[in-house]
Amino acid sequence: MLVVSDTSVLINLAVIGEAEILSRLFHAVVAPEAVRAEFERLASAEPRFRGATWPGWVEVRRPAHIPDDLFTWPRQLHAGEREAIALALEIHADALLVDEEAARSAARAHGLNATGIAGILLRAKASGLIPSVAAILDRIVAECGFWVGSAFRAEVLRLASETP
């Protein structure tokens, strides 16, 4: 499975030392240059991401063209989100790894399959790569300041068969 990643998925998993989940789940993980630049800027400037290192197995590519509508999407998309969507379209990626709702909406509008950290963790558990979705999700929330609503968390844990 070939996937393109936005910054959020990569940096949050990298901070807690779990980025390898992606390399074990997917055949190839590709990210645009704008995502790597944002990752490196956040890792050096944001205390919650300080020390995160770019996974060397992520292939960095530049999209040849960014669809015009991504510059005027109803909610402004960041450069990394625009480039990730464009690259996913260009290389016919099986999925786009992205957490922001506006970027997920834009990806779906362009016919892309979009999934975020919760979907990745559910897939990792189903594949036997991790024993618990809750443990990793809770670390991302605590260590990275990742926001997860209580109803969403409950649904993810239900899908992971981790409800008490």
Image (cartoon, grey):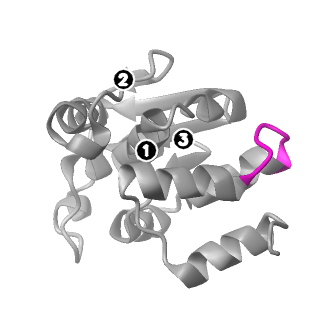
Q: Name the N-terminal-most of marks 3 and 1.
A: 1
Q: Which mark is residue 140?
A: none
**Residue 72 percent location from the top left of the image:** 17, 68
Q: Which mark is residue 92?
A: 3
Q: Which residue is mark 1?
A: 12
Q: Amino acid at mark 2?
A: Thr
| Labels 3, 1: front one | 1
Q: Identify the element where label 2 is drawn.
A: loop
Q: Exactly how many numbered labels are in the figure?
A: 3
Query: Do the residues under discs 3 and 1 have CB atoms within 8 angstroms?
Result: no
Dot 3 alpha-carbon crowd within 10 angstroms: few under 14, some 14 to 19, many 20 or more: few
- Say whether disc 1 or disc 2 marks the residue closer to the N-terminus: 1
Residue segment shown in magenta: 126-132
Whether residue 131 appears in magenta in the rendering, the answer is yes
Report helix, strand or loop for mark 1. helix
| Residue 77 placement, left or right of 91 | left
Residue drawn at (62%, 27%) of the image: 23
Label 1 close to label 2 by CB (< 8 Å)? no
Residue 102 x/y as whole percent: 34, 70
- Residue 26 drawn in magenta: no
* One can see residue 19 in this view: yes
- Kind of residue indicated by mark 1: Asn
Mark 2 highlights which residue? 53
The picture places residue 6, in percent across and down from the top left corner, at 39, 45
The furthest residue to the top: 56
Quadrant in which residue 2 is drawn:
top right
Name the foreground residue: 162 vs 105: 162
Pick the residue in front: 75 or 118.
118
Residue located at (50% from left, 49% from top) = 97
Asked where in the image residue 107 lies, by quadrant, the reply is bottom left
Q: Disc 2 vs disc 3: which is toward the camera?
A: 2
